[in-house]
Amino acid sequence: MTSRFQVKFALGAVGLLGLLGTYGRGALDGSTDLLFRAVDRDTPYVFPGTLFTLRQTFTGIWFPIDYLLNVLVVFWFEAVDGSHPSAAAISLYFLGQLLPCLVLIYSTSVRGDRPTPDLGWMILPAILLGYFIPGVIMALPSSLVGNPFQQYAIAIWNLYPLLVFACETPSTAKPKTTPAPTEAIITNHLRAVRVTNTLALIIGSVIHLFILGVSLATVLFPSIFQPIYVAELSPSTLFFPPVSMPPKAVVPGDGVASLLLWDQFAGYLLVMIVTIVEVQRALMSVKASQSLWSVVVMAVVATLLLGPGSACLLGSWVRDEVLFGGWIQDSKRDTKSSTAVEKKHKS
């Protein structure tokens, strides 16, 4: 089994790499400087390629709330309005893959180390209401909803941790004492896990396959795209964080794609490492024969097919089924039974 030191070292190394990739590149290409200069100015900031100006007031509390919301609106605006196709596609992918990761995080926080009677039938609805639907509204074109509405939508979506918490807390608040896991509690726990995870995996995987399909089409059928989209939507642009020295950013949106790619790479890899360790420990607790490397290979395959966030949620689901659903135990019992029947038949 992987030692605790090895896991901590891997998590620390990935975290440091992600920090350098996200904020280091932003400092090198100047996009971070452009981002803050757009907010720290005497005259209203005009979004590139438009006549729209940045709203400087959202709540009436300039620092830190409105200041931070201004920074976030400037950061996301060029991805949302489509002026940077690669950033827009990566942002959509980010929206889809973070959803199953949020389901994993919130369900784990409710569950803890043991199944609970009300694991949270409202976890997925809360995430849809507080995170996914505001994200969809944020992506509506300004020609349809108006620019002021779009800026408010971007600001509201960035508050999704608070929105999800507000939607989820009434139905999933932990009791002061967690009852012992009876068969009824375990059954309800697994039912909630299966329904919630299935729906989250469908949403995340559909978006993953859609973006992947469009990206592969630029390689297989480049003639159906304008030349700019062939480069902007290629697999190397949408799925692999850049490592070469970045060109000088002209507008804040020039650094969005790079930051999101490095953020996704490091973030999902961190969650994946923890998930792999948890799955391996669950398998060992029931004396399963799968090695750590077999779990890693399955994680890689799931990532390619479903996306990294969906793969992490799938791993967490496997853990629950192994510990509480009797997957391995049932398989062993079936194997022993069939072996016994076969021996009896031969005798």
Image (cartoon, grey):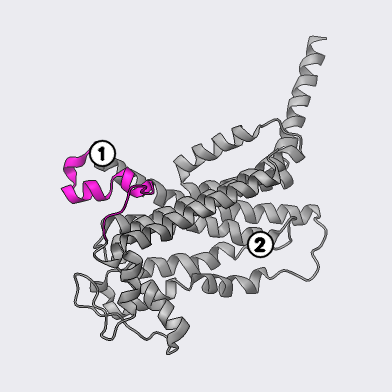
Q: Position of residue 156 (x, y in %)?
A: 43, 75
- Residue at left 32%, top 58%? 87
Which of the 4 image quarters holds residue 46?
Answer: bottom left
The quadrant of the rendering that contains the C terminus is top right
Assess whether mark 1 and mark 2 are in contact (beta carbons under 8 angstroms): no
Residue corresponding to mark 1 = 219
> In terms of secondary structure, where does tag 2 sit?
helix
Query: Can the viewer see residue 27 in this picture?
Result: yes
In terms of depth relative to the viewer, which is nearer, 244 or 121? 244
- Amino acid tagged 1: Val
Residue drawn at point x = 54 percent, y = 74 percent: 162
Number of on-image labels: 2
Counting from the top left corner in percent of width and height, residue 8 is at: 64, 50
Left or right of residue 97: residue 46: left
Q: Residues within 10 Å of mark 1 (few under 14, many from 20)?
A: some
Residue 229 falls inside the magenta stretch: yes
Distance between mark 2 and mark 1 Cα atoms: 42 Å
Q: Which residue is mark 2?
A: 109
Give the magenta range: 220-248
Element type at mark 1 = helix
* Residue in the foreground of this view, choosing between 153 and 7: 7
Q: Is 153 covered by the magenta stretch? A: no
Q: State the image coordinates of residue 94 (x, y, percent, origin top left).
A: 42, 57
Instruction: Give the residue displayed 39% in from the left and 49% down from the top.
Output: 241
Above or below, 32 against 279 in this view is below
Disc 2 or 1, which lies upstream in sequence?
2
